[in-house]
Image (cartoon, rainbow, N blue to C red):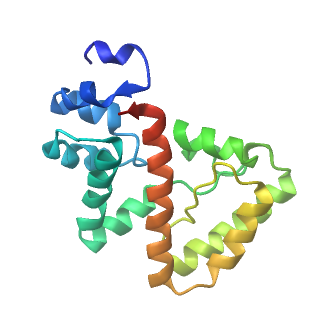
Amino acid sequence: MTDIASAAPYRLAAVNELDAAEFAELLGGVFENSPWVAEDAFASRPFASVDELHGRMLSVVLAAPRERQVAFLNAHPELAGRAHRSEVTRNSDEEQAGAGLNSLSTTDSAHLAELTGAYRARHGYPFILAVRGLTTADILEQLADRAGRETAAEFETALGEIAKITRMRLARLVVD
């Protein structure tokens, strides 16, 4: 990586100067387990703002065929609890820890696993929620509210939550 790798957040002007491999290395983790998003967005450089960069990355996802979007949703981890700790990326682990999901009791962890399992069985992908700033009670309430929704509406909600998550991640990584 170039000399910008020494400290985050990175200046957008420097990000615009990265080659394709450096760009993908730096931004590949913004969209959970989906470096293809950054790889595809690279061709749209230069970006005038971080909002434009995020918008372009999000448009890559939204323009993908439905099968790839479903696979993209399935690249996201379950809300962790105790059962899924090893499946969580560093970004997700930090976000979920901030919401208290890494310190659930065995009973609460089992309850979360039961609810997220039912959600996945109904919709075909994990429950996705921007958990930063939420409590465990908030998360469980939203999970209960969203579990019974129609899958088409929930699909759009999941993509909207991903937009929130990735914008927060990008804001910690790149500044105008």
Along the line of sight, which residue is nearer the eye, 167 or 86? 167
Q: Residue at x 48, y 42 (%)?
A: 169
Residue 91: x and y in percent read: 53, 39
Along the line of sight, which residue is nearer the eye, 69 or 42? 42
Q: Residue at x 27, y 44 (%)?
A: 38
Residue 164: x and y in percent read: 49, 55
Count of numbered circles on the image: 0
Which quadrant is home to the N terminus? top left
Q: Residue at x 29, y 12 (%)?
A: 3
Residue at the bottom extreme?
Answer: 150
81 left or right of 42 in image: right
Depicted 174 relative to depicted 2: above or below: below
Q: Is residue 124 visible?
A: no
Residue 116: x and y in percent read: 65, 67
Depicted 25 relative to depicted 153: above or below: above
Q: Residue at x 63, y 48 (%)?
A: 132
Which quadrant is home to the C terminus? top left
